Each structure stands twice: as structure tokens, then as C-alpha cells.
Amino acid sequence: MAETIAHSYLENTGKYKGILAWLTTTDHKRIGLMYMYAMMIFFIVGVLLGELMRLELFRPGQQFYNAQTYNGIFTIHGIIMIFTVVIPGLAAVFGNFSMPIMIGAHDVAFPRLNLFSWYLFILGAAIALSSQFLGNGPPDTGWTFYAPYSTQTHTNVVAAVFGAFVLGFSSILTGLNFIVTIHRLRAPGMTFFRMPLFPWSLYATAWIQVLATPIVGITLLMVIAERWLRIGFFDPSLGGDPILYQHLFWIYSHPAVYIMILPAMGVITEIIPTFAQRKVFGYKAIALSSLAIALVGYFVWAHHMYTSGMSITARWVFSLLTFLVAVPSAIKVFNWVTTMYKGSISVKPPFLFALGFIFLFMIGGLTGLSLGSLATDIHVHDTAYVVAHFHYIIFGGVGFAFFAALHYWYPKMYGRMYNFRRANIAFGFLFVGFNLLYFPQFVIGIMGMPRRYFDYLPQFTLGQQISGFGGLLLLIGIILMIANLASKRGAKAPDNPWGGSTLEWTIPSPPPVENFHELPVITGEPYNYE
Amino acid sequence: MEHTETHITDYRVYGWVLLALLIFTTITITVTWIDLSALTVMVALIIASIKSFIVLRYFMHLKFESKLFTVFVVMVLSIYVLVIALTFFDYLLR
């Protein structure tokens, strides 16, 4: 036994060699990497589609392709980025890779189910992407598939919707696996309040995955049933209610935002104490705020629907509830900043990305308050302001946290370091490019630029062109970052390159198969730097 | 943390549960012959809830397992009830 676990998880020691060894693995670390490679491919496709939109929008009028093509491009950009990148996101990659090690386990509770989740993810993504090439052309509904248009358009909505349905199953099974793993496989002595905060955030996320995802699953099947059988769930001409679709869709899709952002917050909570060499401030408050965000996040969905025609009472009730969710989010931000206060700060690439996250998440969060407020939302609803807010949270938040996590755990994943200077330069391009790309969208949104429009009035040209230039810088940043991480020239990584205090830094880099020769016994709190 | 005890339920208990479920099913059918107007759906849902409670408690072993599972079930049902209630803020007051 001791001999087998001495091998790194990257070495093939099983029955199969090469790619087959990866495709049949049940090792949580390999499955984490398999999610990451697949998501990187989807992410690059999504980025290129985004750049195609920016190219078309560089000047008013038609430049390269027509309006219907633009509708297809923004729809598939949304479907790829939401369903195959940010929803599985940090939980699927770093939750799989790091969480079992951080709680002192040999693997997740159901390793085969974990591999099955990955196959479902690939299958769902393949079905969703096939919608681009089969039937009557790419879907043109936007990633939200709003009825009644989605029940009437002749484009290939069914494949995209069914792909999202299958992807949902993958998400549910991963959530289930993580809940059971965290309850049953924590190391001896690791009580819930001795558990690191990234697994805490994954625990809160997993409950949303398990409870909310089935609702969108059944809703998407209802869209298919409406299209094929003309039942009359959502289409008013058949006696249905289109607002019912919006309720059902957002009952899942708003909590889904927390599926995306909670693990991101968890990663930032790991990085900041490590690079400030200071015990995390307000451990219990951060842990419980993850659960609070998950819980309150269930009851705010209709703030996406203020202009839909729903009742006035529902509007103010949901507006009130929306403001409540800002409280646990703010608890986290204040605690991150307080953790850094008087710390021995070491500005390495993961820390830079974490700081970038806090800055961008704050802009995204505060502009979210003006969207949660009934009166201001009416003015900026369905404008570029919403596009900017959304991207500040999802790309500035989840995206930058993903990059932070990648730079943080990369030495553990591959047993090699990367070039810090190049990583810092890539960060500079990403941060400047991101702000140039999305900040002007706030401005032209307030001026009245509608979202999802292929053409625009001349007064929006400057804003669109600054965005286009920012998009180019962002693309350069992504290329530089990937080139730096893909280079195999880095020095051998020590077991604990950052001076971290959680369990993953106590085992070799890269970790052995099954992580621990003997399970560690936990006797104290996870962030012990004093 | 490990829970290794196994509980073996007497077949007679399952028999009583089956009988109770059949009786409630009979009541569900019987009340459809009575005109309860607006209360019809509510009565059907109350009977269905009692049946679900019995199934969860005995067939799904909540009675014999750790209290944690009961907490999970209550939490999930509470969220579900709140989501439905909030949706009806729109439908009843539109």
C-alpha cells in the first residue's frame, strides 16, 4: 500500500496507459484537471465569440455579418460561458482537485459517480454545441430561453435546451458528492468549524446545486414539451403564462449565480490569509455567511423580472429581499480586507488576482444594488448597464477568482512553478483590458444603449470602441497567461511554496495517489500563522 | 461520526403502514364525491402530505436514522414552501 501511494497522481500506475488512463480514472485530482481542460477549450471558444461581437459592434451599422448571426453568436456565447464554464467553474475544477485534500480525505465519497458527472458534462456540452450545426440554425433566444419566443422560434432551441438539461444532471451529482464527502470524510478531529473556508463555500454551493438545479431541468423540459406538444404552459396563445417561465427559470438561475460566485469567494478566502500570513479575520462569520448567501439567494429571483408585468407587491417584496443578500456578501469583503490589515503581505500572482477579484466584485456588487432597487432598475433594465454589471460579477468575480485559484494551486497540481513576472504582466493586461472593455458599458447603458442589439446610434460609438480596444487587451492577457502556465520550464515546486497552512500544503507537489499515507489528525483551526 | 447500527423493522409495521396508506387513498377517492368547492385541492393536499410523512418516516427510514437527515428534509421542504409562497405574491396580487 505504501508503495502505491508514493506515486504522483500524474503517473500512470493502473491498468491503462495514456489517454485511456485519464478517461477511466476515478481519482478526484485527475477528474478536476479533466474538467479544467474541457472548460478551457469552451472558455476559449466563448472568448472568441465575444471578440466577434466586439468586432461587429466596433462601428454602427452592419460590418461583418447580419443581425440574425449576431443573435446566434450572443446566444451561444451565453450558453457556453454560463452552462459549460462558470456553473461547473471553480467547484468542478478546484473543488474536485483541492477539497478532498483540504478536508483530509483520500478521495470524494463516490469516485465513480464523480467520473460519471464529468461524462455527463461532456455529453451535455456536446448536445448544446450541436445546436449550432443541426436543425434550422443556431438558437437566437439568448441563454435565458425566454418563452414564448423560445417556444415559437424555428431555430434549434431544443438541442440547446436539452444540452443544458443534461449539464444540470452533472451539476446535481457533483453537488451530492460534495455534500456527502464533507459530511462523512473529514479527517479525524476536523469538526465543521475546523474545516478550511473553501470547503465551507463548496458545501453551501452543493446545496444550491442539489436543490435548485432540478427546477430548471423540469422547466427546460417544459419548453421542449411546449414546442412539440403545444401544451400551453407558457405560450399565451395556447392559454399559458410567459411570466411563469420567468419565475421557474430564475428560481434556479438566480441561485445559480451563487453556484458560480460562492466557490470564488471561498478561493479568495484561502489566498488572502496565505499571502498576508495572518489568521483569517472572522472565520465563523465567513463560514456562516456562505450558508446565508446560499439561503437568502433562493428568495431573490424575481429581481430579474421587475419589468415583466408581475404584481407590484411581488416587486417590492423581492426588492427588499435582494438588499438582504448584500449583507453576507459585505461581511466577506470586510473580513478579507481586515485579514490583510497589519499582515506580512507578499504580492505574488495569486494575491494580485485575488485583489483584482475584490476590486471588480465590489464594482459589480455595488452596481447590483442599483439594479435591485425598483426605481433605478426600470431605467437601466435590458441596457448595456446590465451587461456590464453581469460581467463584473461573473468575469471580474468568478473569472478572476478562477485565475487566482489556478495560480495558487498550480504548483500543487503540476509540481512545477511558473514565471511570476510573466504572470504579473498577464494580470496587468487582463485587469486593464477588463475594465476598458466593461466599464464603458455602464456609461452607454445609462445613456440608453440596449443590450443584445446588433446596431446602435452614433452617440454610443466612442463607448463601443473603447470596449473593443479593451477586448483586444483582454484577449492578449488571456493568451499571455495560458502561454506562461503551459510552459514546462518552471522550477520544481516545493511542497509548500506560499507558506500556506491548510492540509494540501503538507503533502508532496504533485500529490500522491489517494493523497495521504496516513490520515492526518486535526487538533486546531485551519489558519494558524501566529 | 460513523453510524454502523442497522435497524430491522418488523414486517408487521410495514403491514400497518401499507394499511394506513390504502385507507388514506380510499379517503382521497371518497372525498372527490363530496362538493368541498374551494377546499377540494386543500383536502387532497393535506391527505397527500400525511401519506408522504408516513412514507418518509417508515419506508425511507427517517424514524430510525440520524436526526440530521430529518433536519435536511425539513430544511428542503421549508425552502420549497417559501419559494411557492413567494411565487404566489405575484399570482394572487397581480
Image: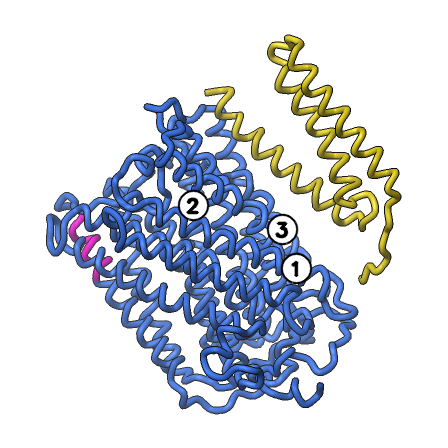
Chain colours: A blue, B yellow
What kind of residue is marked 1?
Gly
Is label 2 in contact with label 3 (beta carbons under 8 Å)?
Answer: no
What kind of residue is marked 2?
Gly
Q: Residues within 10 Å of mark 1 (few under 14, many from 20)?
A: some
Magenta region, main secondary structure: helix
Q: Is residue A366 or residue A66 the one in the foreground? A: A66
Image spot of residue A203 (x, y percent) = 62, 57
Q: Nearer the viewer, mark 1 or mark 3?
A: 3
Same-chain check, marks 2 and 1: yes
Q: Which mark is residue A291?
A: 3
Q: Which mark is residue A368?
A: 2
Residue labelled with disc 1: A282
Q: Earlier in the sequence, mark 2 or mark 1?
A: 1
Seen in the image, is A497 located left or right of residue A85?
right
Q: Is residue A455 or residue A18 the one in the foreground? A: A18
Image spot of residue A464 (x, y percent) = 20, 53
First to last magenta residue range? A460-468
Q: CA distance from mark 2 to mark 1?
A: 25 Å
